[in-house]
Amino acid sequence: METVPIVIVLYPILEPIALSIGMNPIHYGLVFMCTISIGMLTPPYGILIFVNSKIAQINSKILIYSLLPYILVLLIDVLIITFIPEIVLLPVNYFYK
């Protein structure tokens, strides 16, 4: 799915679940959007890979293999953001409390 339909359909369904387990809404939104961005980069859907391979006029398989280290870094970032919410919420708490 595209990013906008995912947000319109899944966000309202998953937000009450996240809030019921005690997740901060800002933290939930950031994790949600980061995982969507990884989903747009990775196969089988990976619309960004196919668009960029057409723009650069290279084979999408070559682009996928060259993006693997970056996708690995993005996955590590999402894991850090997910399991250490203080990293995300520290600036928010500093400026808005």
Image (cartoon, helix red, strand yellow):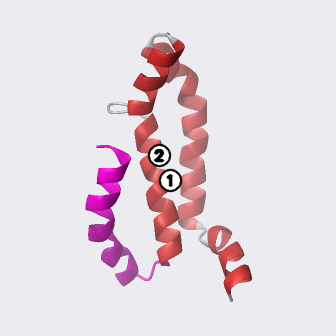
Label 1: few (<14), some or many (≥20) within 10 Å? some
Q: Which residues are magenta?
A: 1-24
Is residue 36 one of those drawn in magenta? no
Q: Which residue is pictured at 68% across the width and 89% down the height?
A: 97
Left or right of 15? Residue 29 is: right
Question: Which disc, if any, is residue 37?
Answer: 2
Is residue 6 one of those drawn in magenta? yes
What is the quadrant of residue 68 in the picture? top right
Spot the residue most to the bottom: 97
- In the picture of the structure, the residue carrying the numbered disc 1 is 34
User: Which residue type does callout 2 highlight?
Assistant: Ser
Magenta residues: mostly which secondary structure? helix
Q: Is residue 68 above or below residue 18?
A: above
- Residue contact between numbered discs 2 and 1, judged by CB atoms under 8 Å: yes
**Residue 54 at x, y percent in the picture:** 44, 16
**Residue 50 at x, y percent in the picture:** 40, 23
User: Which residue type does callout 1 highlight?
Assistant: Cys
Q: Which residue is pictured at 54% across the width and 54% down the height?
A: 78
Left or right of 10? Residue 30 is: right
